[in-house]
Image: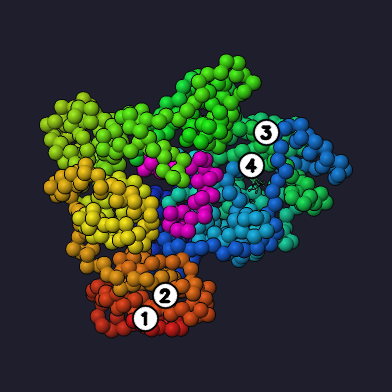
Amino acid sequence: MVREEIESLRAELHQHNYNYYVLNNPTVSDVDFDMKMQHLSDLEKQFPEFFDPLSPTQRVGSDINTSFTQIKHEYPMLSLANTYSEGEVQEFYQRVAKLLNEDFELVCELKYDGTSISLIYENGKLQRAVTRGDGEKGDDVTQNVKTIRSIPLMLHGEYLQKFEIRGEILMPWSVFDEINKEREEQEEPLFANPRNAGSGTLKLQNSSIVASRKLDAYFYSLLGGNLPFASHFESLQSAKQMGFKVSDAIKVCKTIDEVFEFIRYWDVERKNLPVATDGIVIKVNNFEQQRGLGFTAKSPRWAIAYKYQAEKALTRLNSVSYQVGRTGAVTPVANLDPVQLSGTIVKRASLHNADIIEALDLHIGDMVYVEKGGEIIPKITEVAFDQRFMIGEKVQFIKNCPECNSELIRYEGEAAHYCPNESNCPPQIKGKIEHFVSRKAMNIEGLGTETIALLYDNGMLHNVADIYTLQVSDLAKLERLGNKSAQNIKTSCDKSKEVPFERVVFALGIRFVGETVAKKLAQAFKNIEALESADFESLTSVDEIGERIANSVINFFSDENNIEIINKLKEHGLNLAISEEQQQEITNILEGKIIVISGTFSHHSRDEYKNMIELNGGKNSGSVSSKTSFLLAGENVGPEKLKKANSLGVEIISEDVFLQMIKKDFSESNENKDDKNKDDEIKKTTHNQPIMGTLF
Ligand code: IVH
């Protein structure tokens, strides 16, 4: 009964995923979908014996780190011969015509600008996903690929028993823009283009982050022994029917003029697509003819890629200005004569840092080439030296802050210059306040960039502590702020006093202290006084805290202004120590232990176990090695991990043993269960596991 219910829910949710992510045609509301998913997830938790790694619930990924295994490709992943010229496409056509000496068709497709992927399916199920690697062997990224909703985990209708399908994994423009916006707010380096962002994401070791990045995938090649298709086009139609996303921008052409028509049409139209493309791929359609043409050492003779020129424009450099960010990083920006590029008017371009300016040999008044390519922010790629008739002033990176005149510094090994005047440089103060109120920090609503600037300019905000002295009557006086908004801001400020200590540490905006590091510091030092007085040794002894972060923390707390601000925050009642509850959970029982988690658990989720390991001083790892202290194994523990643990003599323990080890009564999450049920529970979770012992 339950099994059938689980299976029917899985089938239904697979279909909804397909309708939404492949067909762009959802047939269920988001709420219904979420409810069904929740129901399935609850059933799977209740009945772990029906676990299936290909269940739709498994698409959320896991935050257990995994290192990738290398897999040899059955068919090498070659590349295509590239050209930027229509003349060479014509030559390709004539070469093929001569070699075949019979009628032939060409298929034109878009060339997707992402990361190539090879998927293996057997009996209708996704078995493995491997990156291109060096073409001979690639990384097994199955866990990450499973999080991509448009990739079928189970195939539709009639499918081939065993085959390989190749395609391109892409980060849609909308997701790319969103991620970069967030990174900009956090002053993290931006991704240059969706290709880099997508391939970086695919290689992340934490598949739950991959799941949050909403990647997509298009497929363009089906491989296998004895495939029942006569042509490439036919094979792609079959791939579509099996549930893969195959682009509709595909055309069978009989003449070279039809090919050119396709090229020209998509040169314009591709800009309206949700993902990046950088050209057209032209392939001989008939498989028999493809075999006849064969391969050169590097690429097939039956295909060619026509690449679109990266769009460039020539314009004049009028001046260079410098922007100061929250951390004091100074970014040079080129001010240009306005010029049309890829449908927008470009007036400014990023110059990145002093080294790039030097390498370009820029002079004011130079004619420069600006490019957009796959990049969102235009950049200067070259000076048109042949147009430099009068030489202007050489662009030299400024020595002093454009906002407060402090002398800039450059840290060893870093490309950026910084203004060190953290407490008095206006954009740094405003930036710090913006960071302090941001969602992942104190989460104060209603204080946007403009309001903060207004409050700062009116002398009502000098630092983050002043936020808590703002009065509704003062706020309401400001332009654009009514009584209601003012009241909302005040309420949100008061509410933020409940934000836990670790987020307050993050909100302080200490250089190099992001969310994760803030958490580590909060757990290790437990209160602000201990953190303030921490020395280099005690800081670097904390897991993942290196020299660079330690020095930055020491530097932050050695500034009188910062101490004064923290004292005020204390007076305003912010959480400057971890809570009693958190305190109780922290021990050093697992200090020095490296632990691998595998399988599904009954008392807590994997994430909860991972957190418990950290709170008790242990370290999580994704793969079993001789350094592993023990394998925490649940139901359906990964067979490879189990094998490796056994062969290396790594101890394997159940969740009950683990909970006893950290002195946590596992009954706390099963309060309603009587003792008999608890015994059953123990039997169930220890079932099938070869060695069970306590470590200490
Ligand atoms: S066919 C022998 N079709 O371009 C290679 N490739 O340099 C056959 N790509 O690594 C590949 N869109 O990742 C093919 N419609 C398309 C493509 C495509 C993008 C990528 C692919 C490959 C590279 C070729």
Q: Would you say residue 215 sits in the magenta stretch?
A: no
Dot 2 crowding, Cα within 10 Å, few <14, some 14–19, many 20+ = many
Report the side of 588 relative to 123 (left or right). Answer: left
In primary-sequence order, the first of circles 4 and 1 is: 4
Tell me the CA gap for discs 2 and 1.
9 Å
Please determine whether, in this image, residue 26 is positioned above or below residue 664.
above
Q: Earlier in the sequence, mark 2 or mark 1?
A: 2
Q: Earlier in the sequence, mark 3 or mark 4?
A: 4
Question: What's the distance in space between the residues labelled 2 and 3, CA to CA?
Answer: 58 Å
* Residue bearing the label numbered 3: 263
Residue pointed to by mark 2: 629
Residue 112, position as x, y percentages in the image? 60, 43
Disc 3: CA contacts within 10 A as few (<14), some (14-19) or many (>=20): many
> Is the CB atom of the residue marked by disc 4 within 8 angstroms of ligand 1's nearest atom?
yes
Question: Which is more toward the observer, 249 or 205?
Answer: 205
Residue 321, quarter of picture: top left
Residue at image position (37%, 30%) is: 400
Magenta residues span 182-211
Contact? badges 4 and 1 (CB < 8 Å): no
Identify the amino acid type marked 4. Lys
Callout 3 secondary element = helix
Contact between marks 2 and 1 (CB within 8 A): the answer is yes
Mark-to-mark CA distance, 4 and 2: 47 Å
**Label 1: element kind:** loop
Q: Secondary structure at mark 2?
A: loop
The residue to which callout 4 is attached is: 111
Judging from the image, what secondary structure is the residue with disc 4 in? strand
Q: Which mark is residue 695?
A: 1
- Residue 376 visible to the viewer: no
